[in-house]
Amino acid sequence: MLDSTLRPVKDAVLQPVAAGPCAKVCPILISTVGLVAALGAGMAAWRGWVIVSVVAWLASRVLDGLDGAVARANGRQSDIGGLLDFLFDTIGYIAIPLGIAFGVGDDTLWTVTAMLLGAFYLNAVSLGHVAAVLEKRGRGAAALGEQTSTTLPRGLVEGTETIVFFTIALAVPSAATIVWTVMAIAVVVTVAERTRWAATQFGMRSMEVT
């Protein structure tokens, strides 16, 4: 919901770093380090190292923004880089809820974590398909002037909201059940709204399987 509003701010902050100290660093390497940081956050959550988990998570998010900034600033954008960026983000989104669930060890939290991961799965399917259709119809990232490798249809829960939810859950593991419940509901609402929007934009007939 807030990504499009905050993206110019993020780019303004990261661009000097991307064009300066990190100009010669491979963007995929930055993505990989970001993945390691996200996995480290999940591991730290499992071990009960709250401060370490929060710091590692936020570091992974900075690196997630920096890899694309470096690629754009230095003409090193690639389709494989965009794919790995999405894959690495998804792995982190799986590892951290699992790490918190292992750390807390509560059956209710495990149930809610399963619901959250299921909501993520639905979101990934809806986001990927809608983005693919938009690209096919010439309404993708390039046509819209977006800097991402593919267009990212907006929703109630995007990257910014995910950072907030995950940070709260990592900082206060005892509240993770509530945080994940709210986030799972919000993600399902996002999927429903995206599907409604797609039906309006693409037409029901064009959405039928052929």
Image: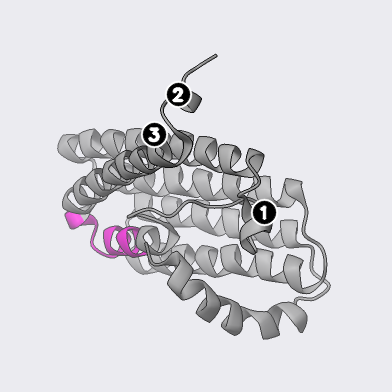
Q: Earlier in the sequence, mark 3 or mark 1?
A: 3
Q: Quadrant of residue 26?
A: bottom right
Q: Amino acid at mark 3?
A: Leu
Please tell me whether mark 1 or mark 2 is closer to you in this view.
2
Residue occupying the point 51% across, 80% down: 9
- Give SS at disc 3: helix
In the rendered image, which quarter is residue 167 located in?
bottom left
The answer to whether the residues at label 1 and label 2 have Cβ atoms under 8 Å apart is no
* Dot 2 and dot 3 residues touching (CB under 8 Å): no
Q: Is residue 76 above or below residue 107?
A: below
Asked which secondary structure carries label 1, the reply is loop
For the record, the magenta segment spans: 164-175
Judged by its main secondary structure, the magenta piece is: helix
Left or right of 203 on screen, residue 150: right
Which residue corresponds to mark 2?
A: 205
Residue 149's label in the rendered image is: 1
Q: Give the image location of residue 72, x and y in percent.
A: 74, 68
